Amino acid sequence: MPAIPIAAASQPAPVLPELLDQGRLTFNDPIYFMVGAHDGANAKFQFSFKFRIFQGENPASRGLLENLYFGYTQFSLWDLSSDSRPFRDTNYRPSLFYYLSDTGVQNRAISRLSLAAGLEHESNGRDGDQSRSINTVFVKPTFYLGDMTDWHWSISPKLYYYVEKNDNADIASYRGYMDLKLAYGKPDSWEFATTLRKGTQKYYGSVDASVTYPLARLIPGTAGYLMAGYFVGYGESLLDYNRKLPWQFRLGYALSR
């Protein structure tokens, strides 16, 4: 692992990607809470973790068992403007996957390459006409370009194949077969990120963009990030995979990005 520079007393130490993978229980997808008000007050939040099922004596092992993870992500849209303030939709996403935080691939363009591949279930836990459920197999490489202690790019295409999609047989028309995440940032400063989807039919798809900034740069001793997010398109949650709701701009806090 590359040496971590010691930050000046007035600056927070940068959190490098490899630090997010130390330990058996670690962050997975971003964890955040944001609030917006377009077409009615609403909130969007997510928590996500991964757990290393078996940790052998050699932490650098690339064996299947030693790098097998259980992941869990839960995402919710919360309607704050209606009576009783109901949750519009909650999506549950458990997964089982093989993950290497560093595959060892490195060249003049790529400073690091991580890899995840496995099985994932996603559903909203409802029945009847509002039931949504998919099972997929996926592979997700993440390419880091540039000095990871400074401003750099990351490119993360998540490619998936639908093993089962009976509750929403036409979901590929709106979501497609890939989530493409692009990010540019610095560990102790701004990060600009967007996740793009393109359905197989017409102009269907979505853009989910965010900007984050370390809170410790403003309030020493704190953790996490100030966050702004923008979503436009189809399928912000599974319930609306085939519906285009009003665009949303939200502000909030992220524990991880």
Image (cartoon, rainbow, N blue to C red):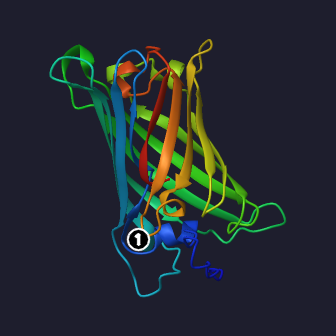
Look at the image and tell me whether residue 21 can be seen. yes
Residue at image mark 1: 65
Residue placed most toward the observer, 220 or 53: 220
Residue placed most toward the observer, 99 or 228: 228
User: Outermost residue, right direction?
Assistant: 108
**Apparent side of residue 43 relative to residue 150 in the rendered image (left or right):** left
Instruction: Judge the density around disc 1: few (<14), some (14-19), many (≥20) Cα neighbours within 10 Å.
Output: some
**Apparent side of residue 5 relative to residue 241 in the rendered image (left or right):** right
Is residue 229 positioned above or below 232 on the image?
Answer: below
User: Outermost residue, left direction?
Assistant: 84
Residue 120 image position (x, y, % from top left): 39, 45
Residue 84 image position (x, y, % from top left): 15, 22
* Residue displayed at 55% across by 53% down: 213
Residue 250 image position (x, y, % from top left): 45, 32
Residue placed most toward the observer, 63 or 106: 106
As helix, strand or loop, the secondary structure at mark 1 comes to: helix
Look at the image and tell me whether residue 94 can be seen. no
Quadrant position of residue 16: bottom right
**Apparent side of residue 165 relative to residue 196 in the rendered image (left or right):** left
Residue 242 image position (x, y, % from top left): 44, 15
Is residue 79 positioned above or below 129 on the image?
Answer: below
* Residue displayed at 40% across by 75% down: 23
**Apparent side of residue 255 relative to residue 180 in the rendered image (left or right):** left
Quadrant location, the N terminus: bottom right
Is residue 156 positioned above or below 186 on the image?
Answer: above
Quadrant position of residue 224: bottom left
* Residue displayed at 54% across by 66% down: 100
Quadrant position of residue 167: top left
